């Protein structure tokens, strides 16, 4: 669950950023001194917000129904689940909160050469590509996910135990299976439904050469 959440949140941000870049390339001229219009700037913000909300919606419903499924399956199984997400979440958060440090321009001389000037932005860009989704997207949101799962799960376990005592274990298992199917549906939506589809252009046919 921890690693799924990491990938799903990063996927939502990546897709939103890609769509924003697509819009900028198609509608905003970056060359020269002409600035983007206010409407175009608002459209870029709206694209990023749209994909962030869509990703958050899928993630919340997955966590919600997965918590219900595990709680209704077996109370002791759910206790192990809580311990596991706390343990793996701790190490994953530490890992994602310490991304690659930005590359600094070597100071071999007071005047860096052309290769050194071009290498520094590439190192800095690589840090942003890896570091920002880690420390600004997934790691900071992992603590609320674990807290919500713990608090809501305790209520769900109490309900599941009461239902099992009144109606038997069969109904609880059926509900657990139904909740798990719903959770897996939103897992699919968080990855495959958020994929970046590339338009495949037909390759140009080679011109025929007539030999005389």
Image (spheres, rainbow, N blue to C red):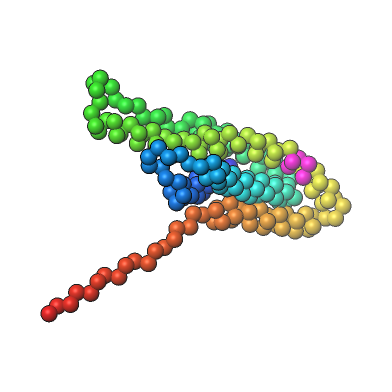
Quarter occupied by the C terminus: bottom left
Residue projecting furthest to the right: 166
Residue 212 vertical position relative to residue 180 in the rendered view, above or below: below
Residue projecting furthest to the bottom: 212
Relative to 130, 55 lies left or right:
right
Residue projecting furthest to the top: 110
Question: What kind of secondary structure does the magenta stretch mostly adopt?
Answer: helix
Residue projecting furthest to the left: 212
In reply to whether residue 119 is colored magenta, the answer given is: no
- Relative image position of residue 7 (x, y in whole percent): 53, 45
Q: How many marks?
A: 0
- Relative image position of residue 171 (x, y in whole percent): 79, 57
Q: In the image, what residue occupies the spot 72% across and 58% down?
A: 178
Residue 33 vertical position relative to residue 70 in the rendered view, above or below: above
Q: In the image, what residue occupies the spot 48% across and 57% down?
A: 197
Give the quadrant of residue 182. bottom right
**Magenta extent:** 152-156
Relative to 45, 147 lies left or right:
right
User: Can you see residue 19?
Assistant: yes
Q: In the image, what residue occupies the spot 24% across and 32% down?
A: 114
- Viewer-proximal residue among 59 and 70: 59
Q: In the image, what residue occupies the spot 25% across and 26% down?
A: 112
In reply to whether residue 154 is colored magenta, the answer given is: yes
- Viewer-proximal residue among 82 and 147: 147
User: Can you see residue 91?
Assistant: no
- Relative image position of residue 18 (x, y in whole percent): 48, 48
- Relative image position of residue 176 (x, y in whole percent): 72, 54
């Amino acid at each position: 669950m921890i690693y799924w959440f990491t990938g799903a949140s990063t996927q939502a941000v990546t897709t939103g950023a890609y769509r924003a870049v697509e819009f900028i390339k198609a509608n905003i001229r970056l060359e020269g001194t002409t600035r983007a219009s206010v409407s175009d700037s608002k459209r870029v913000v709206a694209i990023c917000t749209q994909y962030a909300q869509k990703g958050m919606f899928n993630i919340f419903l997955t966590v919600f129904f997965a918590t219900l499924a595990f709680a209704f399956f077996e109370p002791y199984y759910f206790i192990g689940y809580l311990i596991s997400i706390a343990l793996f979440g701790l190490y994953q958060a530490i890992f994602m909160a310490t991304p690659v440090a930005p590359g600094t321009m070597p100071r071999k001389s007071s005047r860096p050469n052309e290769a050194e000037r071009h290498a520094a932005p590439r190192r800095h860009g690589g840090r942003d590509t890896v570091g920002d989704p880690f420390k600004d997207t997934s790691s900071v949101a992992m603590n609320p996910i674990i807290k919500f799962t713990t608090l809501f799960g305790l209520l769900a376990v109490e309900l599941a135990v009461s239902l099992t005592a009144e109606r038997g274990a069969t109904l609880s298992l059926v509900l657990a299976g139904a909740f798990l199917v719903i959770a897996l549906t939103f897992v699919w939506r968080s990855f495959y439904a958020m994929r970046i589809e590339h338009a495949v252009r037909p390759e140009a046919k080679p011109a025929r050469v007539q030999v005389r």
